[in-house]
Image (cartoon, helix red, strand yellow):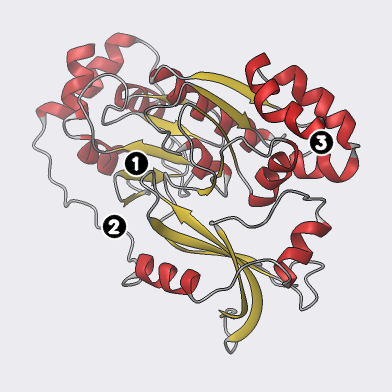
Amino acid sequence: MRQLAERLSAMAEAVCSHYLSNGRKEGHYWKVGDVHNTAGGSLFVRLTGPNYGPGAAGKWTDAATGEHGDLLDIIALNRGLSDPRDICAEAMDFLSEPVHYQPARSDPVPPNTAPSARRLFMASQPVRGTPAETFLRSRGITCSLELDALRFHPRCFYKPPHAPRMELPALIAAVTDITGSITAVQRTYLSPDGLAKAPLEEPRRALGDILGNAVRFGVADDVMAAGEGIETMLALRSLLPGLPMAAALTANHLAAFRLPKSLKRLYIAMDNDKAGAGAAEQLAIAAFQQGTDVHLLRPATKDWNDDLTGHSGADLVMRLNALLTPQDAEQFLRRRAA
């Protein structure tokens, strides 16, 4: 079946267009709701890469369920097949037919979104002394906020559906790729006093390309932590101030986060829900495939920021001490506890 899987991988987009027609192409991935061709975006199919092995075209993960596999698995699950002979027959039928399809056009992307994101970030100011600092401190975050990835804008545009554009204060977070280039920003709109998010239907909005990228705190080399939200990772940074960290912003994006090739050890700060567990599993699989050691940091409540606001610092230090390797506990955790 390996040869069959390789032939399917060589035409991954055609397979997706046929079996997952309710999906869409976004960059190097096909996104759809699930293997049954439900509309949505939790399942990612890689469209580029080698025909076999780690990172191969056709490899897929569903961040909502934790399922993963290759294009033969897509065909089997999509068609409700379990017998390997039936799966091979279906795949051979697909490969033997002339493939009549138009390469899927990517979703329309507003022009120059990455440059626009960079301009917004450069037009913003440091966080210190602003409502953005008030907001983060109100969430129990005690680490230094003099971070390259965070800024504040006092009058950031917000366009509600079917309503005039507004100007609101916002925490601006730079999303960067593995080289450190800004590809997007996340805007967290705040109340004027900074004590809460603005009372909006969507108080967080992204501009630019997030997939595979993250908001980074520190430069990762051989060890790092990765999780979903900015407040989650800043809460951990308050306990582990020297450990490089990345906030992928959502469970789906955490599952697709691109890891540094030099990484030896990864801590996944998972959210304590179904989507968080699925994302952690998929990122762990990707890390294992490149030879990276993985450790899960599971919170006691919903996430580590809720833990930080609901538990004593001493309790959290004790818990993290049991979850970290001894050398990382010595280097990153005990420095703060001393």
Of callouts 1 and 3, which one flags the residue occurring earlier in the amino acid sequence? 1
212 lies above or below 156: above
Q: CA distance from mark 3 to mark 2?
A: 38 Å
The residue that label 3 is drawn on is 301
Q: Residue at x 44, y 60 (%)?
A: 184
Q: Label 3 neighbourhood size at 10 Å, few (<14), some (14-19), many (20+)?
A: some
Q: CA distance from mark 1 to mark 2?
A: 15 Å
How far across and how far down the image is residue 67, in percent? 49, 26
How far across and how far down the image is residue 221, in percent? 45, 31
Q: Quadrant of residue 110?
A: bottom left
Q: Residue at x 59, y 27 (%)?
A: 267
277 lies above or below 43: above
Q: Residue at x 69, y 45 (%)?
A: 232
Do the CB atoms of the residues marked 3 and 2 lie less than 8 Å apart?
A: no
Who is closer to the viewer here, 310 or 37?
A: 310
Of callouts 1 and 2, which one flags the residue occurring earlier in the amino acid sequence? 1
Who is closer to the viewer here, 264 or 297?
A: 264
Q: Label 2 neighbourhood size at 10 Å, few (<14), some (14-19), many (20+)?
A: few
Do the CB atoms of the residues marked 1 and 3 lie less than 8 Å apart?
A: no
Q: Label 1 neighbourhood size at 10 Å, few (<14), some (14-19), many (20+)?
A: many
The residue that label 1 is drawn on is 20
